[in-house]
Image: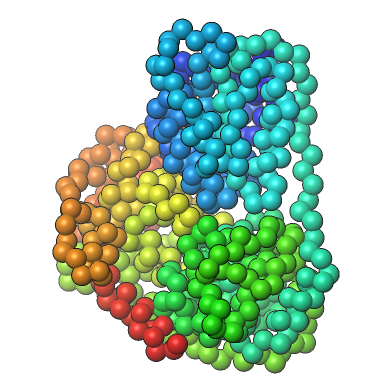
Amino acid sequence: MKAAELFVKALEAEGVEYVFGLPGEENLIFLEALREHPGIKTVLVRHEQAGGFMAAAYARLTGKIAVSYSTLGAGATNLATAAAHAYLGSFPVLFVTGQKPIRENRQGLYQLLSVTGLMAPITKMSRTIESGAQVAPVLHDAFRTMREGRPGPVHLELPEDVADDATDGHVSSTSHAAAPVASEAALETAAEALRSARSPLVMLGVAAEQGGVPEAVRSFLDNTGIPFFCTWMGKGVGDERSEMFVGTMTAPGADYVGAAAAQADVILNVGHDITEKAPFLMSRDRPQTVIHVNTFPAHGDAIYFPQIQVVGDIAHTVRELELRLKGANGADHGFALEMARQMRESILRSSDDPGTGPIRPQYVVARVREVLDDDAIVSLDNGVHKLWFTRNLPIYTPRTHLVDSALGSMGPALPAAIAAALVHPDRQVLAVAGDGGFLMNAQELETAVRLKLNLVVMILNDGGLGMIRMKQMKDGFGQFNVDFGNPDFVALAEAYGARGHRTSDPNTVQTFLRQAFDEGGVHVIDVPIDYRENMALIKEMQMAAARHP
């Protein structure tokens, strides 16, 4: 058989279900091998970056590995942002790029780049397959590497002549050992710190989404009564309707949740990694103990140096800590619960006031929550709307809140929503993007329509780069180089075969959302947004933390 055929058989043996990408001349043999294996679904995208975002979202939603592929040259460089997104976000994705024949190249330096050199710093492994005989062992190593330790992406380059090689290789699935459990000594040290704590808190990060961890976490929280907060990417691990939920840490040291974290003497960090935006800042001058719970050790730096590390299967660790803490009720949770109450009041205070001009963001968030089912999936782009949604939108179900707080790229909301609609066709899927981020991958509307998916895109339209405008104001700079014009988003949606809606009436936000979900198909809702509230929110967050140092 050809090496490309063996490659695809190896993917099949590893349980790969989806391949996202854009073909080129140098990967046609690989594509033909995929055609012969209909058990692996191939999704043609309109830009390689979007295919990488889809594969990363698929990994996050399912815990399984997907493939994102491209040709050489510009096709491969277009994958770089998605690879960095997967690397910092800890998402196992296999990136496969084509390449010219390595034994007889007749095109000189045309399109020739060191793609393995480009990908090496932003993947766990980057390697060229140099012969058909290498296919099986290299893929075996790639899947092991993606899963072990801190998960992440791998890049493999498959040259055109190697893909065409004849080989008699044999493939089998990689043996994946379960993560080792934490040592008894580490568990007891952590339990003793929690038993002795005066005001402990639990922090939930993105690694707590998978492998039965949410169930273990919810049992732990119910049976210990310890209040909890989450990172941007850890939303939904705990039930955020709970009165014990202090809030989402949107900025280090800010808001009511920042005040609670600063006052806590022990923080149990379940699943956070420092590649995500720092949720709180440690200081050697402050007597605060942090317990790191993850499948890999903490990297550690000037702002995160946990004194206790419990490394091993996260669900097992949380269950063991719950057993060890039974009957330990000496902590005082009054301050954290008061901060939780004030956070809820802050969110509710203006959620029913649409404002007098364009619609206020907090009003939109509240209406969205009223329409969404408990297990609806929300995919957020990067921009100032992310601050409002992560702070104000409570999430009830694990793996239903997709946001990038590691690389922080603009443009992933729609591709991630496409992956979500493929994985969960029976659920509501909502992508929320600013006008800037949406246009970075708007072409994938055609992909969603072609695949006959059900999803809604809400564009919060302020005619510019709202986050940068806000930061210019915050830093005392004048507003400069952040305003632009937009196309007619309704016409744009309809040109792609989707349904387009525009509303400037606050009373129709819910109506359009319900209508879109009820009708099915792909819908785009253009909502003019009033971000004059941004600075008021920042001021409140700063004052909340300052009042409770």
Viewer-proximal residue among 282 and 341: 282
Q: Residue shown at 38%/61% (left/top)?
A: 386
Q: Residue shown at 65%/82% (left/top)?
A: 225
From the viewer's perspective, tell me whether residue 387 is left or right of residue 179: left
Vertical placement of residue 66 versus 457, above or below? above
Viewer-proximal residue among 13 and 465: 465
Residue 158: give x, y in percent of width and height. Answer: 58, 22
Residue 27: give x, y in percent of width and height. Answer: 52, 19
From the viewer's perspective, tell me whether residue 396 is left or right of residue 497: right
Report whether residue 357 is seen.
Answer: yes
From the viewer's perspective, tell me whether residue 486 is left or right of residue 318: left
Image coloring type:
rainbow
Report whether residue 375 is seen.
Answer: no
Number of labelled discs? 0
Looking at the rendering, which quadrant does residue 133 occupy?
top right
Residue 168: give x, y in percent of width and height. Answer: 76, 14
Q: Residue shown at 63%/71% (left/top)?
A: 306
Q: Residue shown at 54%/82% (left/top)?
A: 285
Residue 137: give x, y in percent of width and height. Answer: 73, 27
Vertical placement of residue 80 versus 525, above or below? above
Q: Quadrant of the C terminus?
A: bottom left
Viewer-proximal residue among 421 and 532: 532
Q: Quadrant of the N terminus?
A: top right
